[in-house]
Amino acid sequence: QVQLVESGGGSVQAGGSLRLSCKASGRSTSIGTMGWYRQAPGKQRELVATITSGRLTNYVDSVKGRFTISRDNARNTVYLQMNSLKPEDTAVYYCAVGSPSTVLAGKGYWGQGTQVTVSS
């Protein structure tokens, strides 16, 4: 079992920055790929970024060049640095961890979510 605790959400004006953190605890052998999803009201859940245990990263096109995912394996923590935020980035952001296939499939272990609101 893995528990995830997210932090760092909040409200910011367009063009601003936020840094999300997600700390995992519990069964560390289940912490392989780490990722961030988001879901805006009335929209489908979207995979934003992933990082493998070998630190290979992948991003959805809409955040490339603005968001950076990173991880600290010693702390079992994944981060999402979000710069040049846009109103369309407004969503609840969720951390997810597991094997590469489970994270990409939207499964694995999930955090409780943290709200990010970007005003114009």
Image (spheres, rainbow, N blue to C red):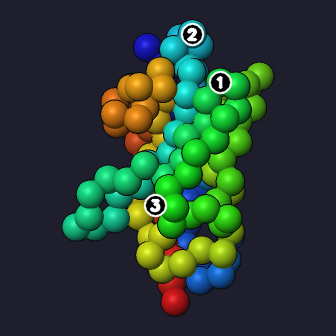
The amino acid pointed to by label 1 is Ser
Secondary structure beneath dot 1 equals: loop
Q: Is residue 106 left or right of 77 when viewed as pictured?
A: left
Residue at the spot 26% in from the left edge and 64% down from the top edge: 43
Residue 33, position in %: x, y? 55, 28
| Picture quadrant of residue 92 | bottom left
**Mark closer to the chain start, 3 or 2:** 2
User: Gap in Å between the C-alphas at discs 3 and 2?
Assistant: 28 Å
Residue 39: x and y in percent read 35, 58
In the picture of the structure, the residue carrying the numbered disc 3 is: 115
Q: CA distance from mark 1 to mark 2?
A: 11 Å
Q: What residue would you read off at disc 2?
A: 29
Amino acid type of disc 3? Gln
Whether residue 12 is situated above or below residue 108 in the rendered picture: below
Residue 83 horizontal/vertical position (percent): 68, 68
Nearest the eye: 12 or 70:
70
Res 18 → quadrant: bottom right
Q: Amino acid at mark 2?
A: Thr
Residue depicted at x 55% and y 52%: 59
Relative to 90, say whether 92 is above or below.
above
**Label 1: which residue?**
53
- Which of disc 2 and disc 1 is earlier in sequence? 2
Q: Is residue 83 above or below residue 67?
A: below
The answer to whether the residue labelled 1 contacts the one labelled 2, judged by CB atoms less than 8 Å apart, is no
Give the answer, above or below, for where 51 lies relative to 33.
Answer: below
Secondary structure of the residue carrying numbered label 2: helix
Residue found at the far left of this picture? 42
Q: Residue 26: x, y in percent?
A: 54, 15
Q: CB of mark 3 within 8 Å of CB of mark 2?
A: no
Q: Badge 3, how many Cα within 10 Å: few under 14, some, many 20+?
A: some
- Who comes first in sequence, dot 3 or dot 1? 1
